[in-house]
Image (cartoon, grey):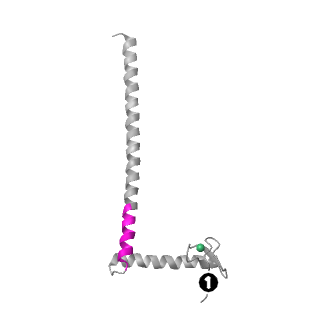
Amino acid sequence: MGFLDELSEGIANTTRDIGKMAQNAGDMTKLQYDKKVKESELLKLYEKLGRKYYEEHKDEESEEIKEITAVHLRLKEISDEIMSLKGGKACPKCGALVKSGSKFCSACGEKIDDIFEE
Ligand SMILES: [Zn+2]
């Protein structure tokens, strides 16, 4: 085989190797992406199942149920504090800020009767 033949075969092999490496890298990127997507899907499914389970068992005395209920209550307190600092309360229907003394929620139109009476 002549020098030029060897050279062109070498170039062809190198090109093929680079192509294969690029394909492997592409496959790896795709697999890693698919893995992240599936992991995130799994978390969402667990979350959905957890919410469903909680709704069906929230009167039970288990440690996990009590922990979630406690976090819900604290979250409500924090939200109320935030709304209070903003000068109002949360709309009972949509949760938007309703300024003190308002008759209706400006976000959803809910009639506000009693949230400011205390
Ligand atoms: Zn509202």
Q: Position of residue 92 (x, y in %)?
A: 55, 77
Pick the residue in front: 84 or 50: 50
Pick the residue in front: 98 or 14: 98
Pointer 1 residue? 113
Residue for point 37% across, 78% down: 58
**Quadrant in the picture for the C terminus:** bottom right
**Quadrant in the picture for the N terminus:** top left
Q: Is residue 55 left or right of residue 79?
A: left
Judge whether residue 86 can be spotted in this image.
Answer: no
Q: Amino acid at mark 1?
A: Asp
Question: Which image quadrant shows ligand 1?
Answer: bottom right
Q: Is residue 54 magenta?
A: yes
Q: Position of residue 77 (x, y in %)?
A: 52, 80
Q: Residues within 10 Å of mark 1 (few under 14, many from 20)?
A: few
Check disc 1 and report its element: helix, strand or loop. Answer: loop
Q: Quadrant of residue 63?
A: bottom left
Magenta stretch: dominant SS? helix
Judge whether residue 9 can be spotted in this image.
Answer: yes
Q: Position of residue 59 (x, y in %)?
A: 36, 81
Does the residue tagged 1 have its C-beta within 8 Å of any atom of ligand 1?
A: no
Q: Is residue 89 left or right of residue 43?
A: right
Residue for point 56% across, 73% down: 95
Q: Is residue 95 magenta?
A: no
Start and end of the magenta stretch?
Answer: 45-58
Q: Position of residue 106 (x, y in %)?
A: 65, 72
Residue 36 higher or lower than 56, as above or below:
above
Q: Quadrant of residue 108?
A: bottom right
